[in-house]
Image (cartoon, rainbow, N blue to C red):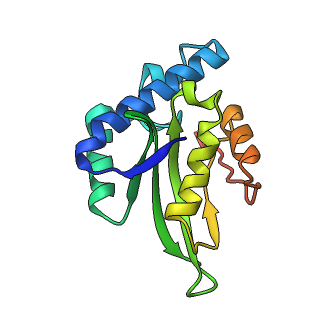
């Protein structure tokens, strides 16, 4: 059974290691080692051009502000992490929500169902009393979309973009 523990700035290198390991597992899953996170950046497969030092600084800034991070532990091994921020509902003051910006885990725990147990732990220990948990999933992230649907999330909105070149 996994556990969660509060992360701090000293854990940033471990968080970045987990990000890279998650992208390696995605590359294995799709048999595509040219995916952007492995060739250009560590950040979510987005168009974010940040290098490792910039990502470290961004995570440090988040942790110094109102963001919280938890490490998902399996014994002594760190197998995942969550980054989130509590907020108030825009239309109904007093209703608490949470925006789960990042939730990553190493592939070895996914097959054992520990990834879902990590979500259950967050809900039970960190998100108690929260009306809504909000996430964003990149459109191209089929594996991630499938996971979040299995976890009980439902599509709510679609963000669309057009390049104007």
In this image, 30 relative to 25: left or right?
Answer: right
User: Can you give x and y, in whole percent of width and height, for residue 129 in the image?
Assistant: 58, 75
Q: Residue at x 51, y 42 (%)?
A: 2
**Front residue of this view, candidates 121 and 66:** 121
Q: Quadrant of residue 19?
A: top left
Q: Which residue is drawn at 60% across and 39% down?
A: 115
> Where's the C terminus, which quadrant?
top right
User: Can you give x and y, in whole percent of width and height, for residue 3 in the image?
Assistant: 47, 46
Residue 97 vs 99, above or below: the answer is below
Residue 125 vs 73, above or below: the answer is below
Q: Residue furthest bottom?
A: 93
In this image, 12 relative to 109: left or right?
Answer: left
Q: Which residue lies furthest to the left in this view?
A: 10
Q: Can residue 50 be seen in this view?
A: no
Residue 29 vs 117, above or below: the answer is above
User: Can you give x and y, in whole percent of width and height, for residue 136 in the image?
Assistant: 61, 51
> Where's the N terminus, which quadrant?
top right
């Amino acid at each position: 059974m996994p556990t969660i523990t509060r992360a701090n700035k000293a854990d940033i290198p471990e968080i970045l290691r987990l990000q890279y390991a998650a992208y390696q597992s995605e590359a294995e899953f799709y048999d595509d080692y040219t995916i952007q996170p492995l060739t250009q950046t560590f950040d979510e497969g987005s168009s974010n051009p940040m290098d490792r030092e910039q990502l470290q600084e961004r995570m440090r800034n988040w942790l110094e502000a109102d963001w919280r991070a938890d490490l998902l532990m399996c014994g002594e091994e760190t197998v995942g992490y969550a980054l989130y921020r509590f907020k108030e509902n825009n239309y109904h003051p007093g209703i608490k929500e949470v925006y789960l910006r990042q939730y990553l885990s190493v592939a070895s725990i996914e097959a054992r169902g520990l990834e879902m147990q990590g979500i259950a732990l967050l809900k039970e220990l960190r998100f108690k009393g929260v009306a809504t948990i909000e996430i964003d999933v990149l459109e191209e992230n089929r594996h991630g979309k499938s996971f979040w649907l299995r976890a009980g999330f439902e599509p709510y909105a679609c963000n669309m973009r057009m390049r104007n070149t």
